[in-house]
Image (cartoon, rainbow, N blue to C red):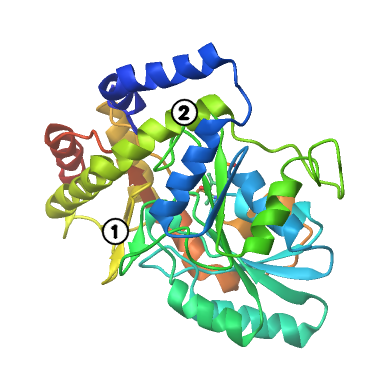
Amino acid sequence: MMEFRDLKTQYEKYKEEIDAAIHEVITNAHFIGGKEVAELEQQLADYVGVKHCITCANGTEAMTLVMMAWDIKAGDAVFVPDFTFFSTGEIVSFRGATPVFVDVDRDTFNIDPVKLEQAIVKTLEEGKLTPKVVIPVDLFGLPANHGEIAGIAEKYNLLVLEDGAQGFGGNIKGKRACSFGNAATTSFFPAKPLGCYGDGGAIFTNDGDLAKLLKSLKIHGKGEDKYDNVRVGVNSRLDTIQAAILKVKLKAFIDHELDDVNRAYQLYNERLTGVVETPIIPDGYYSSFAQYTIKLKNKEERDELQAKLKERGIPSMIYYVKPMHEQGAFSDLQFTDDDFAVTNELCDTVLSLPMHPYLSVEEIDKICNVIKA
Ligand SMILES: *Cc1c(COP(=O)(O)O)cnc(C)c1O
């Protein structure tokens, strides 16, 4: 059976280095913190091109920590794309604030800047909530339209949190994902572009005061040390073993994996252009291809193709089956379904195909032949 994201082949290739890295942590018995975490944070900050990287327990907590640091609370509006993983809206409600969902661009799958501004204006006119933050998501590896979003955020005095959980490795004209906004976050969940062997996450920022506050919040609101507690925080750390694994994987990611997923993208596009709607990467944008997502004509065609692929042993996934505004957890919020025409359509027509750096030409041929047939 073909892998959707082949983590086994990756491990086989880097087995010696990964095993040695894990072994060293266990031998030293430094399971929390230590040099591996500090070195990884420095390497991640250098790669992304920001001053500070703060690792934590997972991508959801990375975003929650930023919401805590910015004191986002009841009465605040946070603008979130309607087409994303649940987490992006969850962390807003978790703080008691209100997520305001915004429809996305049909080509890029990312938050539509025109609709973002409309949603901000509408929220201001209604006067019930105070617009505070926008969270653009770099969906499927493609950076959001951060240029236009920054302009809108400045106009309405909003903070920007880039949700780069799927975006690590992408760039816009060389400026890397996780360097946009006032802060950015990523996830090291195993299937993300840069994944560890469990849960993990990180926050990126150039804001020194924010970095200091986040380092306190992630360790029980520590002051001088973790037994001096100056505020209420959480316990959110990246395990030392995961940091050691990530150091090996970051090197592979930079050395060849990012190029290899982009090569797979080219091979797919060559075979599928004109057959189905293939991913569109705007000029100057570079994707880290967390997913390779095609669009079919309608739900019947999409579901039928997924069944046919399955018959041939080819895994595929539907990201996402349900728009955010339809999730049961948000049922107390008031929405008009018409405001989400694009997301509603995408949920019925998208299909993500196997995508990872170790995908072979033979596998891509096999997948594309089923689609063409
Ligand atoms: C995976 C993901 C998250 C959450 O990351 P975890 O590490 O699983 O908590 C947040 N946002 C998006 C867009 C994601 O894909």
| Depth check, front residue: 101 or 26 | 26
| Depth check, front residue: 280 or 253 | 253
- Residue 14 placement: quadrant: top left
- 256 left or right of 345? left
Secondary structure found at label 2:
helix
The crowd level at tag 2 (other Cα within 10 Å; few <14, some 14-19, many 20+) is: many
Image quarter where the N terminus lies is top left
Residue 62 visible to the viewer: yes
Image spot of residue 289 (x, y percent): 33, 50
- Residue at 34%, 35% (x, y): give it: 307
Circles 1 and 2 in contact, beta carbons < 8 Å? no
Residue picked out by circle 1: 279
- Residue 246 placement: quadrant: top left
Image spot of residue 40 (x, y percent): 47, 39
Image quarter where the C terminus lies is top left
Q: Which mark is residue 244?
A: 2
- 272 left or right of 107? left
The crowd level at tag 1 (other Cα within 10 Å; few <14, some 14-19, many 20+) is: many
Q: Three-letter amino acid code at disc 1?
A: Pro
- Residue at 42%, 62% (x, y): give it: 109
- 355 left or right of 317? left
**Total numbered labels:** 2
